[in-house]
Amino acid sequence: MLKVKPIPGTLVLVRDFISMLRKRNGRIGACMTMLSRNCQNF
């Protein structure tokens, strides 16, 4: 994942953002949460 400075509230925003992506597109959400071979399917 992108290296983000540990700013209070950042992890929460990232988690909510990823959750939103998961609802819209499961593949993109999985790709962002865990960099796996699934990313190569795009």
Image (tube, helix red, strand yellow):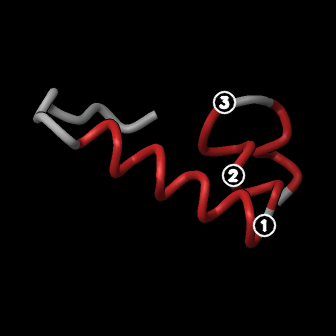
Which residue carries the number 3 mark?
Answer: 34
Q: What is the tally of numbered marks visible in this picture?
A: 3
- Left or right: residue 1 versus residue 35 is left
| Residue 38 in picture, x, y percent from top left | 85, 41
Mark 2–mark 1 CB contact (< 8 Å) = yes
- Left or right: residue 38 versus residue 34 is right
Between 17 and 40, the one nearer to me in the picture: 17
Q: Name the element at disc 2.
A: helix
Amino acid marked by disc 1: Asn
Circle 2 packing at 10 Å, graded few (<14), some (14-19), many (20+), is some
Q: Name the element at disc 3.
A: loop
Amino acid marked by disc 2: Gly
Q: Name the element at disc 1.
A: loop
| Residue 1 in picture, x, y percent from top left | 46, 34
User: Which mark, residue 25?
Assistant: 1
Q: Give the image quarter of residue 12.
A: top left
Q: Earlier in the sequence, mark 1 or mark 3?
A: 1
Q: Residue at x 78, y 66 (%)?
A: 25
| Residue 28 in picture, x, y percent from top left | 72, 57
Circle 3 packing at 10 Å, graded few (<14), some (14-19), many (20+), is few
How far is the residue under mark 2 from the one under mark 1? Answer: 6 Å
